[in-house]
Image (cartoon, grey):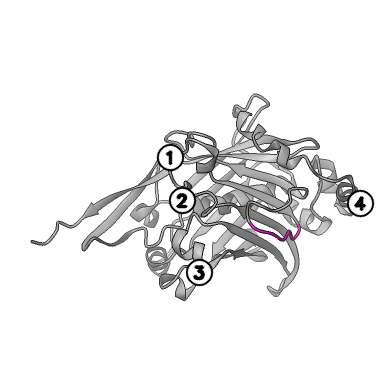
Amino acid sequence: SSSSSSSSSSLSSSSSASSSSSHSSSSSFASMNDVVPLIDAQTAAILGGIDKFTIQQHYKFWDNCAEQPNTYTIFNMEKQQAIMRVEEKSECCSRCFCAPNHSVVLEFNALDPSGNVIFPVITMEREGCCSKNCLGCIICADCCANEAFVHAGRVEGTAGKMPKDMVIGRAKVPIGGGGLTPTIQVMDRTPTSDNHFATVTGPTIFGGCSELCCSVPFKVERVGFDGKAVKVGDIATITKMKPKSFSGAMREMLTDSDLYELEIHDRSVTPQQRATLIGTLLLMDYMFFERDIDMCGVEDGRVYINICNCYCFGAVCPCQLKAPKQG
């Protein structure tokens, strides 16, 4: 597609040495399915053997005082077993003043059955403020568009400036943002560039108080070579889950802690594509659901209730009820 070609050159610099070493260490599952297998055998086995993931964002007490780096745990939904922990690395200043549009690096680490970190699996980067100051606005150029790169293993560096030789996929919002439909294009690594293999789309209205009673589903549709969705059913579903209890509703109202589910419907989705979809899910969390106290608050001395948010060409617009001014 035209949007994927803009960054294809950044994915084409893979060295032959890293590719050959990855082939020798990758599992047969990954070697048979991923066009350019870069993740290690253990990571491929973990991702390739699970079709239902739960992603829980951790609650942090000090988050209501000052913006804290996010932490997530990824579970095998069927076994209710923690398999990975994700830690955000970001600069304190940009996080406090620009969140949720700040630059972030997310480090994924595999966990043993006791919940201890055993080895790094993937790294994700999303460039934001202050180098991309227009994130969150109507998307009329690349500088306004959210984009995330997913790398195999642990990669060091600053978001937006990391080497791209170990990139296994990326996710990007197209110019125009999909109009009134939240849209993210998901790319897979190929030997020469990248391939737009899926598109994530969601509802126009979400968030705010509507989160208390409604889960928010996002469809993941396979894309053909012409860039259009192939109507063979969704290959996966990403769902922002509604709270299941009163305490969960209170946490939803007062914190940024969220719960997501990723269900793979098509078993042909490869381990690296699954890793990219998990990265896309976390990008969506920053884009749509990381707004501080999104349901109610005080602004200019007036109490407001945020009924929901409306998506419009890449921007998220709150629909609020405000108390009248006194006097």
Q: Is residue 156 magenta?
A: yes
Q: Considering depth in this image, is 202 or 154 the residue closer to the camera?
A: 154
Q: Is residue 82 above or below residue 268?
A: below
For marks 1 and 3, give the CA distance: 27 Å
Q: Amino acid at mark 1?
A: Ile
For marks 4 and 1, give the CA distance: 45 Å
Q: Residues within 10 Å of mark 1 (few under 14, many from 20)?
A: some
Q: Residues within 10 Å of mark 2 (few under 14, many from 20)?
A: some
Mark linked to residue 68:
3
What residue lies at 63% left-to-right and 40% top-to-bottom? 186
Apparent side of residue 191 relative to residue 69 in the rendered image (left or right): right
Q: Considering depth in this image, is 270 or 14 the residue closer to the camera?
A: 14
Earlier-in-chain disc, 4 versus 3: 4
Q: Secondary structure at mark 4?
A: helix
Mark linked to residue 138:
1
Q: Secondary structure at mark 1?
A: loop
Q: Is residue 43 visible?
A: yes
In this figure, which residue is indicated by the disc labeled 4? Answer: 24
Camera-nearest label, 4 or 3: 3
In this figure, which residue is indicated by the disc labeled 2? Answer: 288
Q: Is residue 268 visible?
A: no
Mark linked to residue 262:
none
Q: Amino acid at mark 3?
A: Gln
The outermost residue toward the left is 327
